[in-house]
């Protein structure tokens, strides 16, 4: 039965749900209805209206649709499927393997997951050995992998960590490697691990294998992808992965390789520049970030095409807080992993758009949402190359925190950061949560539903904060991105923490053990 729509106080502004909101090119424009120029969605049965609203994203459902009229608001409030879409958006999640569960059951599971993370109420705890001689490691989608150094060879192993669906752990190992990789990247949602190695005469190799069997990956263009490089063996190497693109950043050089077609699509030497980039990170499978220090800190956002015939396009430069000219600034950019597909056997998993970028500089760690950086990739920025002063983006869209001395990467996942152990109290575990659900009162995140244990404390930071440092021009910087800090006492000291979608890992160097806390 059709419901009756009662408008709010501004019916002209919100158009009372009528279809005049659509463009003439749309098949839903009033002209398509002939003699029904005032056809309204509100004349439809509420069940059909609800089905139409499922086509909208959660942010639109919560921020715009309830303003149209009471009928739309009531439809959203009484629909478990629409509520689920909203709450998934608030947690930065996307629907995954739904199985036979109903929207009500998935909504209940989402609330329980939210409550567990906001109170650090893990479901299980288990310890595993970790190699002290680890040369490289990765933590992605519940898989902890490491490459270790032996007497005359190197080996690789991958540990599938306990999860909410499977409390057991399993290991895949090939023992001695038949190569000498400098680093590797992996994406369990593609069953992919890619090893990067150097060879004489300025040639680099990338071997793409399946993570489950460690055989050549069937989607790779070739078992071994070879390409020419210069100064590849010199110093620092950073490898990243986003869907079909593997990136290499070394010696002020950026190489992007499409591993499925076997082509180098970007090869840029930044060393001739007056100020070369210090750091690199893939933003999407078709864009990346360069972090610059020196006398003028900045972040550059670049896009590129799938074809190797096109040069990358400079989309925007975001200036960092101005610092004194006498200081040579260093920068490091780090984000959580990009996954090509939703996690398997989970009702929901983290969206790639709902990730944080942490820009580490000498005077602090700057936290910004990926979605803010991605907006500079929009079609409206067709000219590219825009320069955005710090005051126009930083104070509102970032949060500057005191410097965090991280020893390993993977301290960021999605919209959460696990802080390094506090040297003044090594028995404290601290999480910063920048999701919408953590920083605003929602079911499963309000004080009444949280009820944390006495050994758990939570702090909501919605007001601006100021960092003072003599390196800054003006001696201070104020930022305001909201977040929640959750702290819990643990009964063991760790030297570092890592974080994933369902796990927090504490590493104990002295005993070569890592403890996995599963949510």
Image: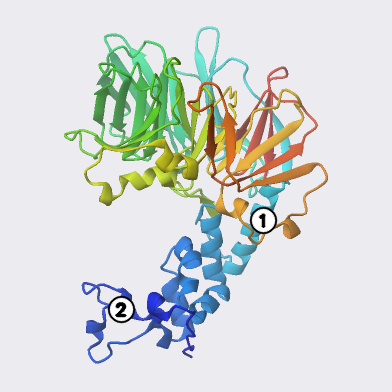
Q: Quadrant of residue 150?
A: top right
Of marks 2 and 1, which one's residue comes earlier in the chain? 2
Task: Tell me the crowding category of disc 2: few under 14, some 14 to 19, or many 20 or more residues within 10 angstroms, Cα based.
Answer: some
- Would you name the residue on which mark 1 appears? 445
- In the image, residue 416 sits, relative to residue 404, either above or below, namely below
| Position above or below: 13 against 59 | below
In three-dimensional space, the C-alpha distance between marks 2 and 1, rounded to whole angstroms, equals 38 Å
Q: Nearer the viewer, residue 337 or 485?
A: 485
Kindly identify the residue that appears in the image at 69 percent across and 42 percent down: 486
* Residue count near mark 1 (Cα–Cα under 10 Å), binned few <14, some 14–19, many ≥20: many
Rendered location of residue 132, percent (x, y): 63, 16
Q: Quadrant of residue 374?
A: top left
Q: Which mark is residue 20?
A: 2
| Residue 438 drawn at (x, y percent) | 62, 51
Q: Foreground residue, 319 or 366?
A: 319
Q: Residue at x 43, y 16 (%)?
A: 328
Q: Let me know if residue 356 appears in the view.
A: no
Q: Tell me residue 221's x, y (percent).
A: 28, 34
236 relative position to 345: left or right: left
Q: Nearer the viewer, mark 2 or mark 1?
A: 2
Colour mode of the rendering: rainbow
Q: Which residue shows up at 30% across the image and 30% down it?
A: 256
Asked if residue 510 is positioned above or below residue 315 in the image, the reply reads above
443 relative position to 44: left or right:
right
Q: Secondary structure at mark 1?
A: loop
């Amino acid at each position: 039965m059709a419901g009756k729509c009662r408008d709010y106080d501004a019916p002209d502004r919100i158009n009372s749900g009528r279809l005049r909101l659509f463009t003439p090119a749309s098949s839903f424009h009033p002209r398509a209805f002939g003699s029904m120029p005032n056809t309204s969605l509100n004349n439809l049965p509420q069940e059909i209206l609800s089905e139409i609203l499922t086509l909208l994203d959660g942010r639109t459902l919560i921020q715009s649709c309830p303003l149209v009229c009471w009928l739309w608001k009531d439809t959203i409030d009484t629909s478990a499927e629409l509520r689920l879409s909203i709450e998934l958006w608030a947690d930065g999640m996307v629907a995954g393997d739904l199985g036979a569960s109903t929207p009500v059951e998935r909504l209940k599971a989402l609330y329980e997951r939210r409550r567990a993370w906001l109170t650090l109420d893990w479901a299980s705890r288990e310890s595993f050995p970790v190699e002290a001689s680890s040369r490289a490691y990765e933590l992605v989608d519940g898989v902890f992998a490491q490459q270790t150094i032996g007497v005359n060879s190197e080996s690789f192993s991958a540990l599938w960590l306990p999860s909410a669906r499977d409390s057991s752990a399993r290991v895949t190992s090939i023992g001695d490697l038949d190569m000498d990789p400098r680093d590797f990247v992996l994406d369990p949602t593609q069953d992919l691990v890619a090893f990067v190695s150097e060879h004489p005469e300025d040639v680099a190799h990338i071997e793409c294998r399946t993570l489950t069997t460690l055989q050549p990956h069937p989607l790779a263009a070739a078992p071994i992808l070879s390409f020419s490089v210069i100064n590849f063996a010199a110093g620092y190497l950073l490898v990243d992965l986003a869907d079909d693109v593997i990136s290499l950043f070394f010696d002020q050089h950026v190489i992007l390789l499409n591993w499925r077609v076997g082509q180098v699509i970007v090869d840029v030497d930044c060393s001739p520049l007056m100020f070369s980039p210090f750091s690199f990170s893939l933003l999407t499978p078709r864009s990346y970030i360069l972090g610059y220090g020196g006398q003028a800190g900045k972040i550059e956002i670049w896009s590129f095409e799938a074809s190797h015939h096109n040069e990358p396009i400079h989309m925007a430069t975001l200036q960092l807080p101005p610092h004194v000219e006498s200081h040579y600034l260093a920068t490091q950019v780090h984000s959580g992993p990009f996954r090509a597909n939703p996690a398997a056997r989970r009702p929901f998993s983290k969206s790639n758009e709902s990730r944080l970028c942490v820009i580490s500089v000498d005077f602090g760690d700057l936290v910004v949402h990926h979605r803010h950086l991605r907006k500079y990739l929009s079609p409206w920025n067709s000219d590219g190359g825009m320069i955005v002063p710090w005051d126009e983006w930083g104070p509102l869209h970032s949060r500057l925190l005191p410097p965090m001395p991280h020893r390993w990467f993977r301290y960021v996942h999605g919209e959460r950061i696990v802080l390094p152990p506090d040297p003044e109290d090594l028995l404290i575990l601290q999480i910063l949560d920048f999701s919408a659900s953590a920083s605003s009162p929602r079911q499963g995140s309000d004080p009444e539903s949280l009820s944390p244990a006495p050994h758990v404390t939570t702090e909501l930071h919605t007001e601006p904060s100021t960092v003072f440092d003599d390196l800054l021009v003006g001696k201070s910087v104020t930022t305001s991105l909201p977040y929640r800090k959750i702290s819990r006492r643990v009964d063991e000291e760790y030297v570092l923490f890592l974080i994933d979608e369902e796990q927090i890992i504490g590493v104990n160097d002295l005993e070569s053990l890592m403890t996995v806390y599963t949510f």
